[in-house]
Amino acid sequence: MNIDEAVTFFRNFLTVVYEQDIANITEPDEQLEQRVARTESFMHSFPGASMTSPFMRPRRLSAERLAKISEQSSTPVCRPLYMVVGYDVPGWGVCFAADVGGGEETNCIAYERQYWATEVGGELKVIALYGIDFYSEALAWENVSGAVVGRTGPPIAVRALEEPRVPRDRDGYQKIVASAPPESI
């Protein structure tokens, strides 16, 4: 896999996550379960490191109750993909990190999630989800679910797609871009 294939993979994954977010407030259980299965087809769990897509609402809602939830919910947005970075990770081989926004820049934060993927059985699969460490002064990530990736070393490839506007996130973004081999950007 190369960095461009990773970018395509993460864009497709974020589209599927978005479709699931919409289904979560608009579709009955059976259709939502199909969306969850589709999202999870992009993921891989290891023993002790589960990657699943949450079923975000109570099951067996009446059509009226689901309509009310839909009416009262905020409109889901497809999360922005800011950057994809390739690393040669000891014990894992080549892994790709996708820095992803929350859809809106609120509370002075543009980034919300970082997904990690690596090749499993010949296909890229999401193996970890990291979230912003809100207690860190500099941009830092903490494992939310899936594998713990560990230390990475410098990037081997970078696709800088959209620079965040929030200073803390922009600084982290610019540091990664500056540390990448010139031929990889």
Image: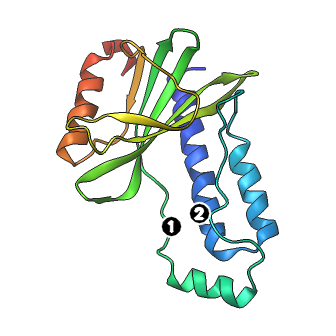
Q: Of residues 3 and 89, which is closer to you in this image? A: 89
The residue at 49%/73% (across/down) is 75
Q: Of residues 145 and 83, which is closer to you in this image? A: 145
Residue 116: image location, x then y, percent:
53, 31
**What residue would you read off at disc 2?**
21
Q: Quadrant of residue 59?
A: bottom right
Residue 54 as seen in the image, left or right of residue 59: left
Q: Is residue 34 above or below residue 47?
A: below
The residue at 78%/76% (across/down) is 60
Q: Quadrant of residue 157?
A: top left
Q: Secondary structure at mark 1?
A: loop
Residue 142 as seen in the image, left or right of residue 180: right
Q: Is residue 66 above or below residue 127?
A: below
Q: Of residues 59 and 14, which is closer to you in this image? A: 59
Marks 1,2: beta carbons within 8 A: yes
What numbered label is drawn on residue 167? none
Residue 56: image location, x then y, percent:
62, 63
Type of the residue with mark 2: Asp
What numbered label is drawn on residue 76? 1
